[in-house]
Image (cartoon, rainbow, N blue to C red):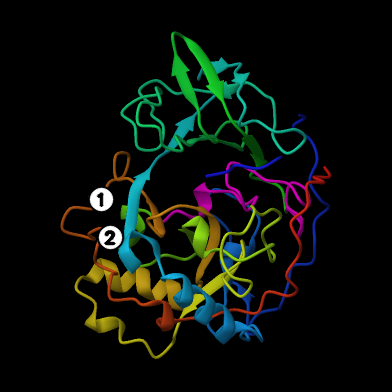
Amino acid sequence: MLGLALAGCSGGAAPGPAGPGPGEPGELTGSGPYFAEPMFWNRDVSRAALAPDSASIIAGLRATGGWGAGDRLRIDFSFDVLGADAATPRHDFTPTADFFAPDCDLAPVPLPFGGNLEGEAGYVCTGGGDCHLLVLDEHTGVLYEMWRADLAGGQLRGGCLAVWDTARAYGGELRGDHCASADAAGLPIAPLLFTADEVAAGEIDHAIRFVLPGDRMGPGYVRPATHALDAAGPANAPPFGVHLRLRADYPVDALPSAGAQTVARALQRYGMYHADRGEVALTAASDRRAAASWSGLLGERDLEALDVEDFEVVDHGPRLPLAFSCAR
């Protein structure tokens, strides 16, 4: 969830360098999902250097109690990415107290018929959760991501909306340095979700989103994050944006399902990025709009054998301080 200061739909930093070339550690292996240009989640980091403080960060996470949900690496299947087109009605929304300027975008949002929020059957936020609304307008190539959306009485209300141009090559500061998005770290959500169709096909070709409870997060943030929250954990606990990689020597074949093994191989090759605050670490898309079903493919607890110590931290550069100075 967000929770700190964060209108305009323009902004963001200029495109940055493409990164290491083919065959080098950190090779960009393609583009997508959703985005046409290669982004940080497309980087193969299986041979990338470790952060100098890798062991310290892992120790800091262990000292706080490890993963959330009883120190078990569990999977959240509650996210949906909806598809919109030119005929999809657009709705203006009333910003709530969870909308912060200049971080957030004030723009009409497409609401596809029969769609839903994260963890909900429709567009009404009934459960008191984050109620993320994720919509890809395939006609314009725009990805809309809103935190704490709610359509009640015909009126759309929303927290922070991040509007992403999926044809753009975003630079290192993404939509703007010190700026949040629909996630506290300032990252897009949809391209970091893994899907039932990917797992059924036996390959996830991008990094994965993960979250931690507030008391297990360290201060500040590292790239690719552009934002942070007040830290409740020790100084060496993982900051926002930290990039964890499953150890290359982890016995993947010992995991209880082929689906779990597919996810684990992606964690070895692409890793996972700390994006927000929450209890259930890994985030996947639901199978509501997938060809494949999660049933019999991957269960919520199939990766519980992965301990904090089975991961290492990919080199991320300097830790940047929390600041309330979003510049777009």
In front: 87, or 214? 214
Q: Which residue is the site of mark 2?
A: 200
Count of marks, rendered view: 2
Seen from the viewer's position, the closer of residues 323 and 152 is 323
Residue annotated with mark 1? 292
Span shown in magenta: 170-194
Disc 1 is placed on an element classified as loop
Q: Main secondary structure of the magenta part?
A: loop
Q: Quadrant of the C terminus?
A: top right
* CA distance separating discs 1 and 2: 7 Å
Q: Determine the residue positioned at 38% across, 67% down.
A: 203
Residue 202 x/y as whole percent: 32, 67
User: Residue 310: x percent and y percent?
Assistant: 40, 82
Nearest the camera: 318 or 128?
A: 128
Quick check: is 172 in the magenta stretch?
A: yes
At 39% from the left and 91% from the top, the residue drawn is 249
Q: Residues within 10 Å of mark 1 (few under 14, many from 20)?
A: some
Q: Identify residue type, mark 1.
A: Ala
Q: What amino acid is found at the position of numbered circle 2 in the picture?
A: Ala
147 is higher (above) or lower (below) than 225: above
Please indicate whether residue 16 sits to the left or right of residue 294 in the image.
Answer: right
The answer to the question of whether label 1 and label 2 lie on touching residues, with beta carbons closer than 8 A, is yes
Q: Residues within 10 Å of mark 2 (few under 14, many from 20)?
A: some
